[in-house]
Image (cartoon, rainbow, N blue to C red):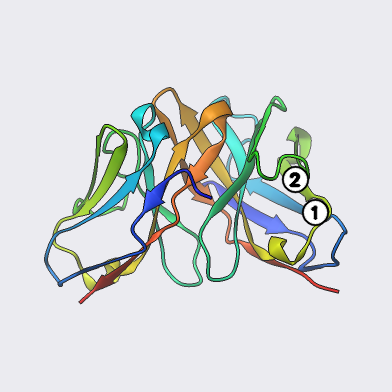
């Protein structure tokens, strides 16, 4: 059974860079059918896709966050990471990592991490 | 703002049928996937592709699509179905978008 686990600081200061890592176990990050993504959810609000990456390094970002986001993959360690720069209080959210399956007629997200709350505050 | 539109809240009597809808241009090209989220928990996939259920999801959950609108139907809603439901679709450039979510209350 595939498992994903987020890790990283729970508190980030305004204007600094948020960095999170997702560790994947029970499967290989270089599976040919898998994309790996980050999704966030501000307290009391809905889900927002941040972006995703294929194991080859090809990335797709939410246009509204693209200027501040970098997602990378490290196949030897079976991990992928998120960096979000110049954070503000609006970036306070539960951040989920997930495995995405993309195909010609659509996509779905079957595996999710438990989520980690990141608070932006001085 | 989200490119997928959902009703904020829907209610259903116990044992009755409820439909949750999701509207957006991307749904003309791509099937929606649907997620159930209970408080304090990660979302759970309940429907994907044309009308597929992951292992362990009850068959009272089903999905459909007509033009730019996707629907999640729960036939015989149970108390444990009370949750937030989100639709999701591919958008241009392999980016994914979510609807704003629908809060389902089972009366």
Q: Nearer the viewer, residue A111 or A63?
A: A63
**Position above or below: A91 against B97:** below
Helix, strand or loop for disc 2: strand
Left or right: B77 in relation to A78: left
In this orientation, does residue B54 appear? no
Left or right: A7 in relation to B95: right
Rendered location of residue B16, percent (x, y): 11, 65
Q: Which mark is residue A72?
A: none
**Position above or below: B90 against A32:** below
Asked if marks 1 and 2 touch (Cβ < 8 Å), the reply is yes
Left or right: B26 in relation to B64: right
Left or right: A85 in relation to B81: right
Task: Give residue A114's quadrant in the image.
Answer: bottom right
How much space separates mark 1 and mark 2, taking CA atoms? 7 Å
Q: Which mark is residue A81?
A: 2
Rendered location of residue A119, percent (x, y): 73, 69
Task: Give residue A71's quadrant in the image.
Answer: top right
- The answer as to whether the residues below labels 1 and 2 share one chain is yes
Q: Nearer the viewer, residue B55 or A84?
A: A84
Rendered location of residue A73, percent (x, y): 74, 36
Q: Which mark is residue A19?
A: 1
Farthest residue in the front direction? Answer: B1
Mark 1 or mark 2: name the one nearer the start of the chain.
1
- Chain of the residue under label 1: A
Q: Residue at x 39, y 39 (%)?
A: B24
């Amino acid at each position: 059974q595939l498992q994903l686990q987020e890790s990283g600081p729970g508190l980030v200061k305004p204007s600094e860079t948020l960095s999170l890592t997702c560790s994947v176990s029970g499967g290989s990050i270089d599976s040919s059918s898998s994309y790996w993504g980050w999704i966030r959810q501000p307290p009391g609000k809905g889900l927002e896709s941040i972006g995703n990456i294929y194991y080859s390094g090809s990335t797709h970002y939410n246009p509204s966050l693209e200027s501040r986001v970098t997602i990378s993959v490290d196949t030897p360690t079976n991990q992928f990471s998120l960096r979000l720069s110049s954070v503000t209080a609006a970036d306070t959210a539960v951040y989920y990592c997930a495995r995405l399956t993309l195909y010609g007629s659509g996509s779905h997200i079957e595996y999710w991490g438990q989520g980690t709350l990141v608070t932006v505050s001085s | 703002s989200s490119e997928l539109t959902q009703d904020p809240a829907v209610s259903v009597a116990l044992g009755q049928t409820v439909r949750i809808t999701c509207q957006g241009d991307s749904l003309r090209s791509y099937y929606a996937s649907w997620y159930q989220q209970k408080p304090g928990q990660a979302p759970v996939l309940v429907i994907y592709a044309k009308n597929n259920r992951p292992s362990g999801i009850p068959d009272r959950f089903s999905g459909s699509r007509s033009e730019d609108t996707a629907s999640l139907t729960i036939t015989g809603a149970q108390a444990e179905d009370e949750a937030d439901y989100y639709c999701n679709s591919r958008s241009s450039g392999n980016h994914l978008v979510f609807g704003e979510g629908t809060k389902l209350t089972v009366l």
